[in-house]
Image (cartoon, grey):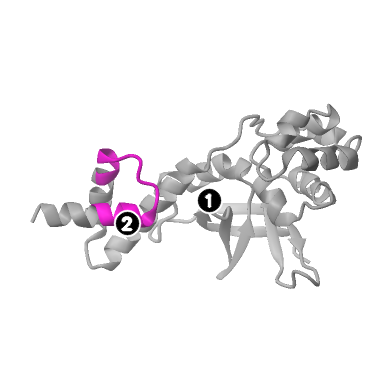
Amino acid sequence: MITHLQGKLARMDPAGPLVEVDVAGVRYEVLVPLVLWPELQGLAGESGLDETGEWPDIGLHVFYSASANQPVPVLVGFLRRAERDFFRKFTTVEGIGPAKAVKAMNVSVSTIARAIEQEDRPTLTRLPGIGARGADKIIATLRGKVTAEAAMADAGYDRPVDPRQYEQRRAVVDAIEAITALGYPRSEAKRWVDEVMAADPTLTSIEDVTLAVLRRRDSTR
């Protein structure tokens, strides 16, 4: 069983939300809750993890899941061991599997744990995919079992992390790669992408960004 990965942060995809970790040339796909993305983006820096940059080092505490109904192993990564331990408890709640738990965790572990211990249903209900019945099940299952996590000194995000800013950053990086693959110099591709993003900051997908660049190029010929 895999409990920890130490390697290079090679890719981030907020749509998953997942990252790829390169360990001695082998890439592992790891689901990572959105609440950790501000810290991951800090590791990635301004490069956005393009194919030409130096990948940053990363260590992830891993929750490993495989079952008869889900034979393909699922890896879920955390920056701190206590977060992984909480996640393991979270998935003991009926109806909350690893994939659902990952998407639900868009606020800090300490915020969720305090809501459980204080029977704060409104906070739990606002977690993606949980709802009122799910909140009641979480409280019934975990109240009294997450007191340590409620006092945990983590990043402290009590407001949901918005994935859109990370999706846009990923789209920009991928669009530069796509335009470069068409035979244009990378420096030019980056400049063109920066120009269209400045003109229309609402562009959020690689398709939209790439098409905007190509249309702009056609109009200037």
Disc 1 residue crowd, few under 14, some 14–19, many 20+, Cα 10 Å: many
Horizontal side of residue 44 vs 156, given as left or right: left
Horizontal side of residue 147 vs 46, given as left or right: right
The amino acid type of the residue labelled 1 equals Pro
Tell whether position 209 is magenta: yes
The magenta segment: 196-212
**Residue at the (24%, 49%) spot, across then down:** 191
Residue 219, label in figure = none
Horizontal side of residue 63 vs 55, given as left or right: right
The quarter of the picture where residue 158 lies is: top right
Residue 155 versus residue 62 in the image, above or below: above
Q: Which residue is mark 2?
A: 176
The amino acid type of the residue labelled 2 equals Ile
Q: Nearer the viewer, mark 1 or mark 2?
A: 1
Tell whether position 127 is magenta: no
Residue at the extreme left:
221
- Whole-percent x and y of residue 99? 69, 56
The quarter of the picture where residue 152 lies is: top right
- Whole-percent x and y of residue 78? 68, 49
Q: Which residue is mark 1?
A: 14
The quarter of the picture where residue 29 lies is: bottom right
Horizontal side of residue 48 vs 163, given as left or right: left
Name the foreground residue: 174 vs 216: 216
**Residue at the (80%, 36%) spot, across then down:** 149
